[in-house]
Amino acid sequence: MRTYFEPEDTDAFESAKALLIRRCMVWAKRQGRELDPMALDTMLNFRHNSIDGRLGYWTTGLVEEFLLSHTPRTLSANARDVAHIPEDLRLLVRYLHATGLADPTGDPQDHLDAAITKAGNEFPAAMADERNFGVAKFWAMNALRRGADLADGAAMAGFLDDARMGRVDYDDGVLAEIAARHVLDGGGRPERAVVQLPVSLPPDAELAAAAERTPVVARLRGLVEWVGEGRALTPSGNLKLADARELVTLLDTGDRFDPRIGDRVYRTQSSADLPVLSSLVGLAKRIRVVRVVRGKLVRVAKNARLLGDSLALWTAAFGELPSPELVTQGGHWPPEHTTLLSVLIDEVLADLLNTLYGLPEPMPVVRLEAGVWLSLNEAFDPDDLDAASETVWRKGVGTDLRRLLATLADFGAVELTTAEPDPVFRADLGFDQGVAPDQVAPFPPDMLDRLRAALRPGAGPMELVSLTPLATRAVRARLVEEGRHAPLVGELAGAEPGPMLGMLSEHYSPETAADEVAGWLAAHGGRDRGLPQLLDAIRGCPFRTRATAMLDMLSHTVPDRCALLRNLRSDRHLGPIATHLLVEDGELAMEELGEEEGLRGMAEQLIHLLEAGGPDAVADALAESPPDEARGLMAALSASGHPDETGLEELRELFAARRPGLATVHPLAGTSRASRNARGKGRKRRR
């Protein structure tokens, strides 16, 4: 049972959703509660069609968004007809926590409970307010009010004709408001973000020490100290030129007065002509450590504490980085490509940082350069450039990028080195003749040729760039704030064992999973005390596919995987999984399996198939056997001692309803490979 699916993995998501809804409804019924399957479907679609796509991840903000924004915008129903939705959401959240499917980085269950109560009180009014509707729902609800059947195509066509002809009475002001919001938010459905690999960070004390050593922290403190009780500015709001001269030396900004460019000397007329100092003053204003009052630059007293915290000060400054000066750096007449790039700096810088985030090795600058050039082409479409001009522009953008990287390096955000690049950065360029065309990076042919020439094997040392730990921490905070999933090694040390193992099996690479498990064990009394708790969590997992992925991942973090699995082979709950993994590893021959172990293996296989593919997949697999054999098989599986009573009961119901036949495969053949897919996911996605 996975809780994350790529947007294009529709079949797998629909199967998992059906399983989750089916099991959740049974669970609720045992407590004397009824659930609306369509409501559960809506909730799971809401999480799947989100920026992060995690079905088990819920926060108080997401609860509020679902109940007071998403559902009123998208669900074409009267408030009274869907009044049960808040309580249905409460039961889903409780089920996710009860079964270990809740994401451990989400909000605690009691916080979610309180948020559902609060938003539930506002839900009826939100559902009834037309201003909350989406465009499609606005017309659907108007059609319903006129008695139209939304499922009747002819009736809806007639209604829309009436609307176009002005025969439908509606509030055009409300419709205009809805349409404007639709344009601003793109229809309300966010684009799925690229999955980020887990990152490791040094302790905050080390990060604070690193921030303390950065020029920007020293310069900001020096500037504020220099401001003192206040410094008068020119009528245009700039530093006086004499003060600027003093600060350039005091803060070691490197700005030049009266620079000579070619045969010409450009007289410095204003502090605005000094790019580093001018940017520093602007930055100090944006983070509110100084401000302008009545023509004077003064300190902001309430933010004095920020100056004493080097990590907080650096992080605040980093958050204000995107500005055109990063590219133009105060040039008098920058080239047109530089000006265009400065217009795109917000987007370009975010893409650059996101690309470098989480990479295990420094990235060749030439690959970043290719991405920046493509961004510029997409935004401004300079196709009318002739070949010579395009070459000049492309090289100029490369120069702009290197100037930007140098500024970021001075800031302490990136590290620039020169060395042989890791082979991973040419793996998708098609050097290997066996690489399928759809596996080659989608660069234009001329750009692909340039990258191949630059990154060919044996090309030698080149410029490389990587994020510093300071920037990694800051970028991660921004990603999390945007709602993206950005795992941090060590953040699960206090999590419950089941949710922790589930997350590792789905989202972590083998290396980062091993680090996370080691941290969790250290926080829970060491291996001798902690490992039994982890194994108990797997035993308690009600989904066999998820339990398999969890045990597979966990056994890869111990010194002797084979020994652990062999010890578990006789375990009532984990034995069928351990046996399956040993066979997969080639550590156990199928001929060594006894009759009962083989039957438990077949039960395990069919339950996996039922969970991953649904009832149709099981029926198809067993379609060729006569009913008598099917009944005999089900009787044998029921008596095999397999521990998953829920899975066996679902199989019995399926056999009784469809009378499937007997599969002619080995009991362990074709068992779910979900765990291996999860392990490989981290490696495959590295850029």
Image (tube, helix red, strand yellow):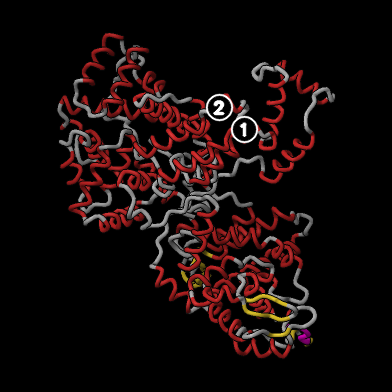
**Which range is magenta?**
267-271
Counting residues from the N terminus, which is met first, the one under dot 2 or under dot 1?
2
- Horizontally, residue 601 falls left or right of residue 107, namely left
Name which residue lies at 59% across and 73% down. Answer: 407
Name which residue lies at 50% across and 59% down. Answer: 477
Name which residue lies at 66% across and 40% down. Answer: 187
User: Taking 452 as reference, is 11 above or below it?
Assistant: above
Disc ID at residue 127 = 1
Indicate the secondary structure of the residue bearing disc 2: helix
Residue 166 found in image quarter: top right
Name which residue lies at 44% across and 49% down. Answer: 684
Amino acid type, residue under disc 1 in the picture = Met
Residue 567 found in image quarter: top left
Is 268 one of the magenta-colored residues?
yes
x and y percentages locating residue 465 in the rendered image: 51, 67
Disc ID at residue 82 = 2
Marks 1 and 2: in contact by CB < 8 Å? yes
x and y percentages locating residue 419 in the rendered image: 47, 71
Amino acid type, residue under disc 2 in the picture = Val
Q: Name the outermost residue toward the right.
A: 165
Q: Is 145 in front, or is 529?
A: 145
